[in-house]
Each structure stands twice: as structure tokens, then as C-alpha cells.
Image (spheres, helix red, strand yellow):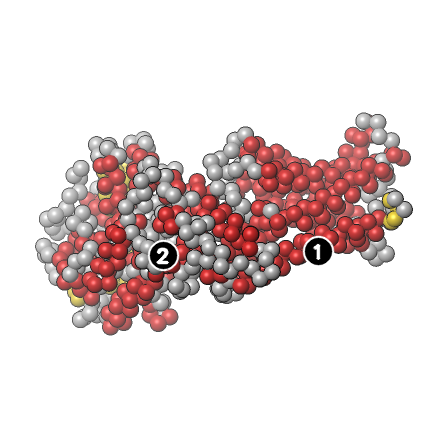
Amino acid sequence: MTDPATHTYLGLPGYVWLWLFAIPAFYLFWRRILQIVRLLRKARPEPRWDRIPKRSWEVVKNVLGQKRLLKDSPFGTAHFFIFWAFVFYATGFTWSLFRGLFPFLPIPYADDVGWMTFLWEVLSPPALVALAIAALRRYVFTPDRLERTWDASLVLGLIAVLLVSFMAGQGFKALAGGHASVVGNALGRGFESMGVAPESATSPFLAMWWIHMLTVLGFMTYLPYSKHAHLLASPFAVFFTSLQPGGMPPESEGAARLEEFTWRQLFNAFACAECGRCDRACPAFGSGSPLSPKELIHNLKEVVVAAVPATNGNGNAKILGEAIPAEMVWGCTTCGACMERCPVFNEHIPLITEMRRHLVSEGEVDERVQDVLVNLTRYGNSFGKSPRARAKWTQGLEFKIKDARKEPVEYLWVVGDYASFDPRVQPVTRATARLFHDAGLDFGILYDGEQNSGNDVRRLGEEGLFDLLREKNRKWLDKAQFQKIVTTDPHTYHALKHEYALGNGHGIEVLHYTELLDTLLQQGKLTPGPSLDVTVTYHDPCYLGRYNNVYAPPRRVLQALGARLVEMKRNRDAGYCCGAGGGRIWMEDAPEIKERPAENRVREAARLQGVDTFVVSCPKDLVMFQDALKTAQLEDSLVVKDVMELVEAAIPFRKRSDSNVGER
């Protein structure tokens, strides 16, 4: 069989031509890569070299295993085959290129090795089918926010050329008497039936070999300059993902210009596939807010890519306020849906938080938010109430709740602002206290010593105020004697569990009240009465679900009560945000809002057959969804209740002076 590298073309052996094509291709490829690295090195540092085994496992699951994309069936399966075909073709190309550049070495071409040929032939047919599915998805059944660009068309075309040229080459090779393979032999017989004689099959084989090799060299050269640079960047984006729930950026004064961001924040631009999955999951975008997570990264990319060719980079390039308007930054609810859906692990929320910090430092904050920040600084709560009023909700209870500052308790209950001050939530808070008491829990609260946890303050970009609130809370937490913390607020839960460094590194257990209820029910310390005759749906709070993976306990509680649970289509990690997070509960809606996220969510629940109760496990959710029922005019078909209200209905208390269970 003729060796493509030693065969003569226009008077020169093939390996000379291969060198002539390979040198500029590799030069342009590595030149671009080094320019990108140089730009990233000029950005702020952000350590991401910890926990190497964990990071490597994320790559195995989400790059090699395509875990997130496989959820997106059937295209996820199609992408899986395209990806692995790409991996093996890249491996085989490197192998064959090395063999072609150095033909004197005693090594075979990759397609002369049985196991490599077998893998190629197993992957190539399904990869071609997968490409057809990808093309149909992009050009016929196009999901919202997936764009039809010439760049995407070119890449799909190049991959198709690679697959077809290899398979056709195998057929001509088999026909000419070269290394036999199953698919190659079948294609060879097909070519022969079409009139191709074995003695004339060498020329088309050589043509297919060169088409394949030159296409890969061209593809390699083009990739780092195109939007499909994510094919190169995404494994690194997954490896260098934040391993902290919520992934807050390092403390800073914020960022507006290129070099004020961290290298990982800028790296989002290169990893983005512009697939639109983030937009399709984003409650802000779905409501008509100025925020589009996809456009956010795209606009960042425009600035970053423009700065790459510069020898010294353009560190003064303005991102915030020009490429990315402030209105877009303030639209985020920090629900995490975009990051949960992103197949390349881009980090939208840390990027947004970084820009919010700059806006806060410049005083460019909504007037209502500014008032709340003043209240938090002055009173330690977002309601602007005296700290002495924090425990007024305890009035009317038939027992005294321990002051954990003065006597030891097993459970320290950090109540949170909305559960303490909002009159719509206080009945649930009192019901929780009665249940804890009747279950025999040794618990207490901090009374006026408790401050807002600062979770939403931090997401607003007020890092200094977060530090102040954390310091004040830590003062009493360090003095109080307790074994565990329980809270009814998922936002407080997240901050205490991940951002307070409780127990001086010893790890004090922090529980959401649904986790505690689940344990008490399993231990028999709570015994439900007759099963509740109610059909419910359950909403996963973002800071309990996506941020902390607490999905099963609240559902087990509902099951133990005998409630019939019907899931909404968007549940668990695909749950839809109420719209309150990230400080949005303190902001005015943008004029272009079509439908608030909470309204969209209650409409989804109202469409469920037989469901009349919408169950929540977050004080903010209770407030947001009760308001949404009114504005959506669904008060006659649905009622919003906290999990604790159902527990109160199913488990007898000694006294229910202010319970509103069963009322509409």
C-alpha cells in the first residue's frame, strides 16, 4: 500500500508537503494560545490549584462522561458521540501526523493499528448520525437562544468532512489491498460496485488522506480564533471550577475594567459555547429583565477577544458600563440556575458579584437597596426595626424560649429576618417554636444578639457590610454554648454553613429545619396523626436545593405526613427561582418585566392536576408566592403554605392560638 508521506507530489515527497503545512498551522495555533495565556496572566490572581483529585473527578464526570449534557436528551447523547469521535480523531491525527512527519521511524499509522481502527469505526457512524441531529436541532428544531451562526455551520461542516474523509479513505484503502477493517471492507465493496477498480483505488485513498490531514490542520488553526474555542477551553473551565457552594469570588473592591477581574472570570469568555442553556434556565431573562447570562458572557468575550492580539493587552478596556450595562448586572437573583445548566461550568454569578461590588463602591445602587443597606448597618436587620423587636414574635407562646447567650442549649436556632419580623411569616415561626418545644428539643435563640446573616448583602456586592454582620454574629456564636445550629431560612443556612467558618475549623453542623424535621420523624420524636388529605406540589428554594443539594428531606417530611406530592416539571436542580435572591427582594422591577418569576412559578403549579397547595420551606418564598397568587389572580385555585403549616395540621400541638392552617 502506498505510503502517503513518501509518495511524490509535484516532485516533492509527501512528508515535505506535510512539514510545509504543519509549521504555519502549529505556529498560528500556539501563537494564539500564548496570547490568551499572556492576557489571563495580567488579570488578578485567583487560586484554583487546591483539591486536585476532586477537580480531576469533575473532569472525568463532566468532560469525559458529558454528565450535564446527557441530561439534555436526545441531543446530549448526540453530543456524547460527537465529543468522543473528536477525541479519538484528534488522537489518531496526532499519531498519524507524527508518523507522516518522520516517515523513517519504525511505527505504523494509527489506522494500521487494529484497536484504533476498531474504535474509529465504532464511533464514526453514530457520530455522523449525531451530527445530523445537531444540524436538525440548530437549523430546524432550534431551541430558544441557540443562534444559527456561520461559525457553528463551519465547525459542523469540518467535523463532517473529517468523519467522511476518514471512512471513505478506509474504503479505498481496503479496496486497494491495504489494512482490512470491517467498515473499510464494506465500503470498499460498495466503491467496487460503483465501478472503482482495485488498481485505481490508491489515488482516491491518497486524496482522502490529505483531505483529512489538511482539514484537521485547518481546524486546529481556526479553533482558538473562533467561538468554538470552548472545545479547547472547556476541560480547563471544568477543572478550575469553584469547589465552594455558590462560588463567591475573592474579596475585592470590585471590577469594571479588564485587568480588575480575576483570570478565572475572564476565562469564562473562552469557555462559553453560546448554547443558550443559561438563558433558558434564567428566571430574570424569562421575566423580561435586561439580564441575559448568555449576552453577559458574550459581551465579556467581545472585549476579551479584542484585547488578546495586543502585545501588552488592553487592561483599560471598559467592561462594566459599556460592554455590560449596570441594569444587566442588577437583574440577577443569584439563583444559580445558569451555572447549574452550563455544560462548560462557566461562573456567571461570581462575575456579576464582582461588578456589583464596583457599583456599590461607586454608590450606583437602587435607592430602596441603599435604604436597606443603611438599615442593616444601623439595626442589623433589613426591616429597619430595633434589635429589641427581633424576638417580639415569641410573645403569646405558652413557654419561654431559652436565651442561648446565657445558658447552654443543644440547638441554636438562628431565626432570620423574615421569620422574625414579617407578620405574614411570624405564625409559621411560632408554630416552629411550638413543635421544637413539644418534640423535647433543647433549643434557644440569640434574641437581640442575632443580626442578619449577610448572605444577600454579600450577593449585592457589599462585602464590607457582610464582614461587619458576620463579625457581630460570630461574637455571640463564639460566646453561646450549643452543639448544632438550625435555621428556617435557606439564605441564612447557606451563609452559616459555608461562609462563617464556624467552630474554628471544627465544623459545627448547620441544619435546615426540614432536615431536622426529617430526623425527628425518623426517630419517632414526632408522630403524625391521620394522613393529611391534601395534594401538594413542592418548590425547591435555590439556596437549599441548588446551592446545598437538600432535596430529599422536605419531600420525606411531606411523605411522612401523608400528603400526595405532585412534582412540577421544573423541580430539584431545575427548580425555578421565586425572584427574591441576590437582594432582588429589595429592588424595584425593571419596566420591561413581562411576568415576575414568582408569578410564572405559581402558574406552573396551578396547571398541575388536582394540586391545591403550593408548599415552600423558605420565609422569602412564602412572602413572594403569596403576593404572586394575588397578582396572578390564582387565590381561588391555589394556596401557599410553609412545610411547617402542614406539620402543624398533622401533628397535634398543645395550643394553636394563631394557627391559620386550613384557611385560604
Closer to the camera in the image, 649 or 39:
39
Instruction: Specify the amino acid type for callout 1.
Output: Tyr
Q: Which residue is at 16% across, 39% downward? A: 663
Closer to the camera in the image, 573 or 316:
316
Q: Hey, which quadrant is residue 120 in on the image?
A: top right
Q: Which residue is mark 1?
A: 27
Identify the mark nearer the N-term, 1 or 2: 1
Q: Which residue is at 36% across, 56% downward? A: 359
In this rendering, does residue 559 appear at all?
Answer: no
Q: Which residue is mark 2?
A: 359
In this rendering, does residue 371 appear at all?
Answer: yes
In the picture as drawn, the residue positioned furthest to the top comes out as 194
Label 2's element? helix
Q: Hey, which quadrant is residue 626 in on the image?
A: top left
Q: Quadrant of the C terminus?
A: top left
Q: Mark 1, residues whose alpha carbon is within 10 Å: few (<14), some, or many (≥20)?
A: few
Tag in front: 1 or 2: 2
Position of 257 with respect to 33 (left or right) is left
Position of 168 with respect to 548 (left or right) is right
Give the spatial CA distance, label 1 vs label 2: 42 Å
Q: Is residue 2 above or below residue 252?
A: above
Q: Which residue is at 49% across, 64% downward? A: 44
Q: Quadrant of the N terminus?
A: top right
Instruction: Specify the amino acid type for callout 2.
Output: Leu
**Percent of width and height locating residue 243:** 46, 59
Q: Hey, which quadrant is residue 351 in on the image?
A: bottom left
**Percent of width and height locating residue 297:** 48, 49
**Percent of width and height locating residue 545:** 37, 50
Q: Mark 2, residues whose alpha carbon is within 10 Å: few (<14), some, or many (≥20)?
A: many
Q: Is residue 638 above or below residue 59?
A: above
Label 1's element? helix
Count of marks placed on residues: 2
